[in-house]
Image (cartoon, rainbow, N blue to C red):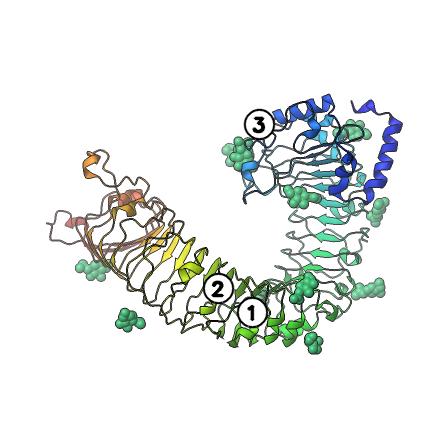
């Protein structure tokens, strides 16, 4: 059908296109050819699209517009205004609502319909983000000779990549990344290639992403890739590559701007690597490789570099001192590299011309010592300063307060000391995340100071923040996470706390001297986790935030009854130990079927120990125990000890096959350990159980042991 164009016309068109598209960007490719109106659909192409659709499941109805005569109007389809032929098919499944699964197109047959082969003028094909159920990339794709853009990333293809792709001599973009992402099933073959010789037939290829494709059996991958002299972007992350490139290899890739060789198995030194010839490189990603040794002087010739990612490698020591010409640096990532020097000395090697270009500096866990340089405030474009888990000493330089673009400041777990005042924050207009955890810093900020930023996260754990609750946080209403464990707070929790942080997900202030009671109802809160353990809080346990999954109110002075209903259906960990709670355990507790840890120990609870068991064979309507058929089935830790509970060994524990720790001691339980215990609780490691002998002694023969440790 494609033969409808004569050979000459095709050749002419190809040359024309070549001229046009050699300079065009991918997204403008097909658009350029449709400008001036839509064509009218050609009937065989319409049939081809319909038959492609027929082979797909489309639960989200993404192809619902695919009906009627004019296929050029269909969602994702574009036609040439000149010939009316389909030139672009974009069925990319983009992330919506943070989850792309629901919009996925899935294969309904064993393989993709080959009808797409009829779209001979197709220049742009994007099927990324869908689910092709582990099938192979179909060979017919190799017949779409006009393709400039082919995106099959994140779409669950498997097996061998067909060498027929070598027929796509116009191809500029090839992206098959992320097809190893979905499936870990050992029987499933990830995309792989044995022979890359077909690449050399793609002379126009400028953007190649094979990340996640298994290239471990390709012997001469470097020489094959080295033929692609138009390449600008080469991403071969996690391809099982080893260091087979010979030191003498001369790189041909003079236009290369982005090289990503992360997560391969190059157990070698960086010295004399082939990519040091590529002085046009803007991004060099070598993280998670097994690179070792020092960072060589050759880096100093890479004057176009903007992004250097050497993180999580075995590289050692400082960067070389000859980087004066690297004036475009934006991102430096050395996380988990053993720099083992003073941070001042390290940063002194940053070229001065890059002080105002650097945006991201990631130095977490790099064995840095010494003080932060006072001139850090001159790095005016800095947005991320991440230097967690080092041994940085001294104070936080005041200059930091001048960094108007700083969004993320993480100096957690260093040896910083001294006082932080509002002057340190005065110009931080963009700050969103502040982490000083685990330093000996004193945070001394007036309660009515109004910060110039709107934080999303703050972590001051183990710093000294108190005694007063930090009033200046009152206006930080965008908080997602407020972490104030062990911060010397000796105050009541202010009323505004529950309003200002009503949208936060994590609220921690353990190990302080917080006083006062909690509001009776926290149902309006968005919190997923609240930890206020080890304070001096009083009053009753409130109705909980509706989505909460973790609550620690242990070691306080909460008293009174538990709410008849906690109203926390998602809760997984509930720790109310060591309070003064009285009354019975409400039967609604049996509905908290997601609980993995429940600790009510050290209170004054009375009445029946939780049974949470429906006597189905024994006239259940009378026994009326809550229908809680699942309660306990995911539990691994249950502590009800040191109360005044009575009753027999809880029957629901027959379901607790995951249980590892069980403490029922110091109660008034009677009876004995059930016979089913070893069988139904195979993971149990620690059991503490006292029974009283007042009820007669018919089980005494098996229950003398009150503590049992596996
Ligand atoms: C391919 O599609 C994915 C989204 O599914 C996108 O992130 C990626 O940038 C695309 N690749 C190219 C080369 O345009
Ligand atoms: C389609 O695939 C998605 C994942 O890509 C999966 O979540 C969904 O269950 C599949 N739908 C059908 C109907 O197979
Ligand atoms: C892809 O779809 C198939 C059925 O069409 C489904 O069994 C599979 O789980 C889906 N893959 C993923 C990752 O959801
Ligand atoms: C690739 O091109 C060759 C020659 O041009 C042709 O014989 C072959 O059929 C093509 N393969 C595919 C899959 O289109
Ligand atoms: C993997 O394949 C083996 C043999 O072909 C089969 O017995 C096994 O069930 C398969 N496993 C999975 C998870 O499909
Ligand atoms: C460089 O690329 C050209 C094609 O663009 C190729 O002919 C040549 O062999 C390559 N040189 C090396 C050393 O691979
Ligand atoms: C940097 O490049 C110059 C000229 O291109 C060259 O003479 C020099 O050896 C290179 N330096 C390093 C460290 O590779
Ligand atoms: C930091 O130094 C210690 C002691 O020399 C070493 O064990 C550790 O691996 C180093 N850290 C990193 C990230 O290399
Ligand atoms: C940092 O910037 C300030 C103000 O612009 C300037 O006075 C100072 O000299 C700079 N520091 C360094 C070390 O260049
Ligand atoms: C933030 O960075 C931009 C460039 O990314 C720059 O133009 C601007 O001046 C910086 N703002 C501050 C306050 O330094
Ligand atoms: C806790 O508060 C009570 C009074 O409410 C007080 O008697 C007690 O000393 C406080 N405990 C601590 C550790 O502050
Ligand atoms: C209850 O058991 C604990 C050990 O779990 C034991 O130390 C204690 O003496 C027992 N108390 C009674 C009253 O049996």
Q: Do the residues labelled 1 and 2 touch (CB within 8 Å)?
A: no
Quadrant assignment, res 627: top left
Q: Which of marks 3 and 2 is nearer the N terminus?
A: 3
Label 3, label 1: how far apart the Cα atoms are: 53 Å
Q: Name the residue under label 3.
A: 108
Q: Which of the labelled discs sits on residue 390, or is there none?
A: 1
Q: How far apart are marks 3 and 2 (CA)?
A: 53 Å
> Label 2, on which residue?
475
Q: Do the residues labelled 3 and 2 touch (CB within 8 Å)?
A: no
Q: How crowded is mark 1: few (under 14 residues within 10 Å), some or many (20 or more)?
A: many
Q: Of 689 and 506, which appears nearest the observer? A: 506
User: Image height check: is 397 above or below 88?
Assistant: below
Disc with the residue nearer the chain's start (3 vs 1): 3
Q: Nearer the viewer, mark 3 or mark 2?
A: 2
Q: Residue at x 22, y 50 (%)?
A: 609
> Which of disc 2 and disc 1 is earlier in sequence?
1
């Amino acid at each position: 059908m494609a033969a409808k164009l004569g050979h000459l016309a095709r050749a002419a068109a190809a040359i024309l296109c070549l001229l046009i598209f050699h300079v065009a960007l991918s997204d403008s490719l097909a658009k350029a050819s449709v400008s001036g109106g839509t064509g009218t659909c050609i009937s065989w192409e319409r049939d081809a699209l319909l038959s492609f659709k027929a082979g797909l499941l489309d639960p989200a109805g993404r192809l619902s517009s695919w009906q009627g005569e004019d296929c050029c109007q269909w969602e994702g389809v574009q036609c040439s205004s000149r010939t009316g032929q389909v030139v672009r098919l974009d069925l990319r499944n983009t992330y919506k609502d943070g989850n792309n699964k629901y919009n996925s197109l899935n294969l309904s047959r064993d393989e993709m319909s080959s009808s797409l082969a009829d779209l001979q003028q197709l220049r742009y094909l994007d099927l990324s983000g869908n689910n092709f159920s582990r099938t192979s990339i179909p060979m017919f794709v190799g017949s779409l000779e006009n393709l400039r853009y082919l995106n099959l990333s994140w779409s669950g293809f498997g097996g061998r990549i067909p060498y027929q792709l070598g027929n796509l001599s116009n191809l500029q973009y090839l992206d098959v990344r992320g097809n190893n992402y979905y499936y870990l099933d050992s029987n499933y073959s990830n995309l792989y290639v044995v022979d890359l010789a077909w690449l050399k037939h793609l002379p126009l290829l400028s953007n190649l992403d094979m990340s996640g494709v298994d290239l471990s059996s390709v012997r001469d991958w470097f020489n094959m890739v080295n033929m692609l002299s138009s390449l600008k972007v080469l991403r071969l992350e996690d391809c099982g590559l080893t260091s087979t490139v010979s030191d003498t290899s001369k790189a041909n890739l003079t236009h290369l701007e982005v090289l990503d060789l992360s997560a391969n198995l190059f157990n070698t030194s960086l010295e004399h690597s082939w990519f040091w010839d590529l002085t046009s490189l803007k991004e060099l990603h070598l993280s998670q490789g097994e690179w070792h040794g020092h960072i060589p002087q050759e880096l100093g010739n890479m004057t176009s570099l903007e992004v250097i990612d050497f993180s999580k490698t075995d590289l050692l020591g400082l960067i070389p001192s000859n980087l004066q010409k690297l004036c475009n640096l934006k991102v430096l990532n050395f996380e988990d590299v053993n720099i083992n020097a003073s941070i001042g000395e390290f940063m002194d090697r940053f070229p001065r011309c890059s002080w105002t270009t650097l945006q991201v500096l990631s130095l977490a866990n790099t064995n840095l010592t010494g003080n932060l340089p006072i001139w850090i405030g001159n790095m005016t474009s800095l947005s991320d300063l991440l230097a967690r888990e080092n041994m940085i000493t001294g104070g936080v330089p005041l200059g930091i307060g001048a960094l108007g673009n700083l969004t993320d400041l993480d100096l957690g777990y260093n040896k910083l000391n001294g006082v932080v005042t509002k002057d340190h924050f005065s110009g931080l207009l963009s700050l969103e995340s502040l982490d000083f955890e685990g330093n000996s810093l004193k945070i001394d900020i007036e309660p009515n100071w109004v910060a110039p930023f709107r934080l999303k996260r703050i972590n001051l754990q183990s710093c000294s923040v108190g005694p007063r609750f930090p009033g200046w946080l009152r206006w930080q209403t965008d908080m997602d996470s407020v972490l104030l464990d062990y911060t010397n707070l000796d105050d009541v929790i202010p009323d505004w706390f529950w309003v200002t942080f009503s949208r936060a997900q994590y609220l921690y202030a353990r190990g302080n001297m917080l006083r006062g009671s909690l509001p009776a109802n926290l149902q309006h809160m968005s919190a997923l986790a609240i930890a206020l353990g080890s304070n001096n809080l009083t009053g009753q346990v409130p109705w909980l935030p509706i989505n909460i999954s973790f609550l620690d109110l242990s070691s306080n002075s909460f008293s009174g009854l538990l709410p008849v209903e906690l109203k926390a259906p998602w809760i997984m960990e509930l720790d109310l130990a060591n309070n003064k709670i009285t009354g019975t355990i409400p039967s609604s507790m049996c509905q908290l079927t997601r609980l993995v840890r429940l600790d009510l120990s050290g209170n004054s609870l009375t009445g029946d120990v939780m049974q949470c068991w429906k006597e189905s064979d024994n006239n259940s309507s009378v026994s009326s125990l809550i229908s809680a058929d699942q309660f306990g089935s995911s539990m691994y830790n249950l502590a009800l000890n040191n109360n005044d509970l009575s009753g027999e060994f809880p029957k629901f524990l027959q379901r607790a096959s995951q249980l590892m720790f069980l403490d029922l001691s110091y109660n008034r339980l009677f009876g004995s350990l059930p016979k089913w215990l070893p069988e139904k609780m195979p993971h149990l490691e620690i059991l503490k159980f006292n029974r009283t002998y007042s009820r007669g002694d018919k089980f005494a023969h098996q229950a003398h042991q009150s503590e049992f440790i596996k």
